Structure formats: structure tokens, C-alpha cells
Image (cartoon, rainbow, N blue to C red):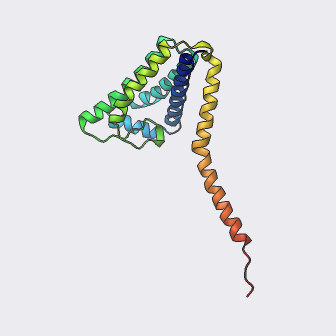
Amino acid sequence: MTVVELLGAAVRFAAALFLLYVAAQKLVAPRPFRQTLTQLRVPAVAAVAALVPLAEIAAAVGLVAAPRSAVSALLVGGLGVAFAGAALEAMRRGERIRCACYGRSGDAALGPRQLVALPVWLAVAAVAWFTPAGFTAGIPHVAVVTLGLALVVAVREVLPPLRRNWSYHNVLVEQSSRKVAPR
């Protein structure tokens, strides 16, 4: 495997992991994304709210399973253009529209971030389209990315409550181990 293939695989896998994460966030908590679409005055909000995460999942799977496919590149590039278009619309109107791009965890407003991200999305599409995939493409690699997503979710969602509970546990143990003075 060449360095170019390795870098291409790293870009594709990172983008796929990110796309799967944001799609999962939108599917688990659809309300923030629907509110964003409503503020943007998107027609058929329910349909679009369902289609965008599906497109993100399809793009992620395409980046891993069939990176040199035109469909994969078009999905990734199209998502980037759609996100940038939403930001341009919010900026054109002069409205602060909450960006639910990352599902329930996104509190920023649509704007320059999405415009800056557009070249990144286009670059990911180009890397997928032009970089030899070598042995880093195929359906079995989707499982690798999905496992990576599970690890990211575990770190991001499960560890903070565990730490809080462990701290609480330690405080209780410390309090119970203090000797009570006799009266």
C-alpha cells in the first residue's frame, strides 16, 4: 500500500465516521434538525429530515465500500453543497438559524463554518474519486467504520456520566468512611 492510498483511506474513513455520527444524531433526536429546516422554510420538512440522514449514511457507506464510484463522490459533494447553501440562505436573510448539522449536539448558527467546510467536502469527494483504494475498500470495511463510530459514541456519550457517577461514588465512600464522633 502506498502513502497516497493510506492517506486516501484515512480521509475516507474519517469522513465516513463523521457522516455516520451526524446521521445517527439526526435520527436519534430529529427535532433540532427539523426545526432548522423549518426556519430555513424548506418544503416537505418531514421528508427532507428523513432523507438527509439517509444520504449521509449512503455517502459514508459509499466512501468505504465504493470510494471510486461517481455516486459516492456526488453524495459527498452534494451534501457539502447543500450545507453551504443552507448557510448562504441564512446569511442572505440575516437570520440566526441554529445549525442542527450535528443533531442535538449542535448549537452554533448556520454561516461561515459551512462555507469553509464546502472545500473540505469537495476535497473528500475528490480524494475518494481519484485516490486508488487498494485493499481499503469494500463492504467489510463498513463494519470497521461502524465499530469506530461505536467507540467514538462510547467515549463521547458514555464516559462523562460514568466519570460523574464515579466521582459521586468516591464522595459517598469518603463520607461513609469518616468516623462519627461519639456523643
For the point 59% across and 33% down, which residue is it? 149
Residue 102, placed above or below residue 50 = below
Q: For the C terminus, give its image quadrant.
A: bottom right
Expressed as whole percent of the image width and height from the top left, the position of residue 103 reads: 47, 38
126 relative to 38 in the view: left or right:
right
Residue name at image x 53 percent, y 33 percent = 21
Looking at the image, the residue that sits furthest to the bottom is: 183
- Residue 93, compared with residue 13, is above or below; it is below
Query: Which residue is depicted at the point 54% across and 12% down?
Result: 132
Residue extending farthest to the front is 3
Image quarter hosting the N terminus: top right
Compared to residue 173, the image places residue 56 above or below, namely above
Viewer-side residue, 134 vs 32: 134
Residue 141 locus on image (x, y percent) = 63, 21
108 or 13, nearer to the observer: 13
Q: Position of residue 147 (x, y in %)?
A: 64, 30
Residue 61 visible in the displayed image: no
**How many labels sit on residues?**
0
Please say whether residue 99 is visible from this viewpoint. yes
Q: Is residue 170 left or right of residue 31?
A: right
